[in-house]
Structures are given as structure tokens and as C-alpha cells.
Amino acid sequence: MALVAGVDSSTQSCKVVIRDVETGALVRHGRAAHPGGTEVHPDVWWAALLAAVESAGGLDDVAALSVAAQQHGMVCLDATGEVVRDALLWNDTRSAGAARDLVAELGGPRRWAEAVGSVPVAAFTVAKLRWLAEHEPGNARRTASVCLPHDWLTWRLGGPAGDGGGRDGGELVTDRGDASGTGYWSPATGSYRTDLLEAAFGAVPGLPRVLGPREQAGELRAFGAGEAGRVPLAPGTGDNMAAALGVGAEPGDVVVSIGTSGTAFAVAATPSADPGGAVAGFADATGRFLPLVCTLNAARVLDAAARLLGVDPEGLDRLALEAPAGAGGLVCVPYLEGERTPNLPDATGSLHGLTLGTSTPAHLARAAVEGMLCHLADAFDALGLDPARVLLVGGGARSRAVRGIAPAVFGRPVVVPQPGEYVADGAARQAAWLLAGGDEPPLWETGGAERFEADATPDVRARYAEVRDTRFHDA
Ligand SMILES: Nc1ncnc2c1ncn2[C@@H]1O[C@H](COP(=O)(O)OP(=O)(O)O)[C@@H](O)[C@H]1O
Ligand SMILES: O=C(CO)[C@@H](O)[C@H](O)COP(=O)(O)O
């Protein structure tokens, strides 16, 4: 039985799945935690990857491997391949002012949408590079090349066995999906916009070569591999693109992911360009496109509510399901980490409608779940689609309360695939595609999905919208 490995190096953890190439059956898996915070030295991802691989039983028997990872993170390397400074992650908002400046300098959001499919906000690599040039000019001058988390991990995996840091000049590569989150690569033309990068950063550092969906990224050299047999590395991709591949999303589906970020995205045949900036016009991992709306606040809203109430995730579910729909008028606008969509990087969360009646743990739990889901429903609406299927994935989709309340808030049934690691699965499927060749990724049985239905509660969304607009209209 030939096996492939898929990695998901996401915000909170690194996950590894080992799957059968032919059937996609899960053979082994492992994970290791990432630290909190919005800047991290890439070596920390490397250490977590090693630990996750070990807990997945190693890679000795895999025939190909692919890495997916959190999008946008700025990894700067010097001329010797050493990391210049901690990577700034997608959810680090210090670059919000830099993004505003870039939008103004190019002549407004429409110009950016036309140039690269997206209007940069703090998350985009291009804004982080402007921030670096302005605030850490010494680090900017040392930056000989810039890449993304999955590019860097792929590069390290292809390094010499026993590599302890630094590299000997191997080529950096990326894929269309992750390149489309930089703000200096156009999904529509498939080429870098080095003019935009130079205008933002004052120089054009080395950039990863952008690979096609099943182009080989190199060979596995870490873990002592590459001596006995050759293990090809697939191009890898951003975590949302990998999730689309992992659940087998097709045009007509919208995927809503509740991880550290909340995302709503769809597979599209043509590129998109939203001058309003809400929809990022990304590329996907199959040669198509992935219009996507991303929020900064999703599963961690549930974590925060559980912490506040002194309960575990199951306790939060139980409380939320005890309270009535609408939580008696208690509304949580969950901008706990600032927000990206809408673009309110300095916003904080808000609780509105406290009365003696709503001052109960159950009402607070319900308000947190509904607020998080109303916020995601806004993201879903921004896509402007009427999909045949809405798929709910990510760690937060494991919550019983989320599954029960989501169809009411979204006003349509939701399908929850069997609990799994869909980003790592997508990476594994890409690795299998590299081995199999062909125009389409191999078809894998994704297992039993569960469909959840509920009566729509438009009044819950209306009340949320009223509080959101009153509180944040002028923010
Ligand atoms: N049963 C559950 N109920 C609610 N939330 C859960 C549950 N299991 C996991 N989570 C949440 O999932 C989140 C992590 O999701 P994940 O998709 O792995 O994030 P990321 O990909 O951003 O690292 C955590 O914030 C965690 O609280
Ligand atoms: O910035 C985006 C999408 O544009 C985020 O979705 C990141 O890719 C992080 O993903 P998670 O770790 O939350 O899955």
C-alpha cells in the first residue's frame, strides 16, 4: 500500500495525516501545538512539524508529501538563508496603516483589485513588507528573499538531512494559491507584480518560483530521507486552498471554515476582483480560483466565552443550547482581535443587551455562538452566492452548538463532513495527485457527512446587524 503525507501548519497547531494513495483512507495522524501570538520564529513551526511527524509515526514509508499552511505570513530570509526576524502572521494588525497607505498610493481599492484581485489589508504580505521597510529598515535591508510559511517549510523539508538551520542555496518555490495572498502576484495573469512590491518595499527581494498545481517542488531530504528512495514534494498551498481540495469543493459549494480565522470561500472558474475589498480574489490549488472572505474572529470567540464561563467546549455547547434563540436580546459582536472584514483592525468585542434576565451563563454562551455565526454569515453574504451546498469545517465545526445553530443563522441547511483535518487532507490529496498525474486530483471517498437543518431565525441576524451598525458604523 503506497502512502502519502499531508501537513497543515496552521495558526494554532501543526497536523500531519498519512493516507493511502489509492483510496484516501486515513492510516495515521499526529499533531503538535504552536505558541500563541501573532509573530513567531519559523523554527517554531519546524519544531512542531518534527513533533507532529513523530506523533504520526514518521515518514519512512511515505511516497510523497505536501505542506499546506496559514496564508500571508511574512518570512524574510537573508543572503545565507537565515531568518531575518520573527514572521509576522496573517492576524498581526500592526501593518493596518501600511495597508491604508498602499491603497491610497496606488489610487484606491479598485486599482488594487484590478492589479492583484484583492485590496490589501493588514493581513497581506505586501502590507507587512511596507511596515518592515518603515519600522525596521535594517531588517528590510538584510532581506534577500521573502516567502510564506508553506514555502519555507517545503524548502526546509527539501534540505540536507540533519539540517539544523540555514540552507545551502536550494530554490524557494510556492504555488498559485499562496502566491495570491501576497498582494504582489496576480491570479488573473499568473505573474508577479514586482512593480507593486518595489513601490511597497523599496526593493524587489528574491521571490519563490510559482509552481503549477501538480508540479514537483523538490525531494524530501530532511528526516534522513532521500538516500534510500526518492520522495517527491508536491507544491503545497495555503490552508484554505488545501481545505477546498480536502473536502472536494466544486463550483456550487461554499465552504465555511471556523478555525482561528473564519473564512467563507468558493471554487470558481474565473478570477474575481472586488473593489469593495471584502472578497479576496485568490487562486486555488487546482488551477482555478478561490474568492474568499476572511474574518479574524472565529473559533477563539468560543474559546474566550468558555474561559469566561469556566467551562470546557462541551459545557459551552450545553449552555448555549439551553438558552432561547436570540439569547433574550443579548448580542455579542465578536471583534475580539480587531477585525479584517469589515476592516476594523483596532476594534474590540462588544456585548449589548445585558439585563437581569440575560445575565446568565446560558444567555452569554448563546450570544457568543450566535455572534460568531452572525459574523460568519456576514462573510458568507459578502461572497454574493446562492450555493447548492454549504460545508462547515475547521475546529469550531466540532461544536454541537455551532452545528445546531448555524443553519438557523445562515437560513439554510449546512453539511458537516466527518470530523477530520481537511487542510492536511487536501495537502495529502495534492501529494497523491503529484504521484498519479492527470488533469484532476484523484477522487477519494470523503466519508459520511452530516446535514443539519433548522428553522431560519432572521430576527437574530437583524438584531445583530442593528447592534453591529450602531456600535461600529463610525469606527
Ligand atoms: N468541540 C469543540 N467545540 C468548539 N471548538 C472546538 C472544538 N474542538 C476544537 N475547537 C476549536 O477549534 C479551534 C482550532 O481550530 P483549527 O481549525 O484547528 O484552527 P487553526 O487551523 O486556525 O489552527 C480552537 O480554537 C478550538 O477551540
Ligand atoms: O488569512 C487567512 C485567509 O486569507 C487565514 O484563513 C489564514 O490562512 C489562517 O488560517 P487558519 O489558521 O485560521 O486556518
Image (cartoon, grey):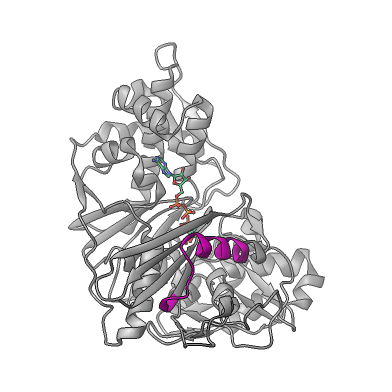
Q: Quadrant of the N terminus?
A: bottom left
Q: Residue furthest top?
A: 356
Q: Quadrant of the C terminus?
A: top right
Q: Residue at 62%, 63% (x, y): give it.
A: 47
Q: Residue at 61%, 49% (x, y): give it.
A: 36
In front of the other: 35 or 32: 32
Q: Is residue 115 above or below residue 258?
A: below
User: Is residue 113 among what the camera can see?
Assistant: no
| Residue 5 in the figure: left or right of residue 2 | right
Q: Is residue 396 magenta?
A: no
Instruction: Residue 181 in the image: state x and y as whole percent.
Output: 50, 70
In front of the other: 111 or 129: 129
Instruction: Residue 279 in the image: state x and y as whole percent.
Output: 40, 61
Instruction: Residue 60 in the image: state x and y as whole percent.
Output: 47, 75
User: Is residue 186 among what the camera can see?
Assistant: yes
In front of the other: 35 or 19: 19
Q: Residue at 38%, 52% (x, y): give it.
A: 394
Q: Which residues are magenta?
A: 45-65
Q: Is residue 392 above or below residue 251?
A: above
Instruction: Residue 412 in the image: state x and y as whole percent.
Output: 20, 45
Q: Residue at 38%, 32% (x, y): give it.
A: 314
Q: How many marks?
A: 0
Q: Is residue 55 magenta?
A: yes
Q: Is residue 430 above or below residue 313?
A: below
Quadrant of the rendered image containing residue 18: bottom left
In front of the other: 276 or 77: 77
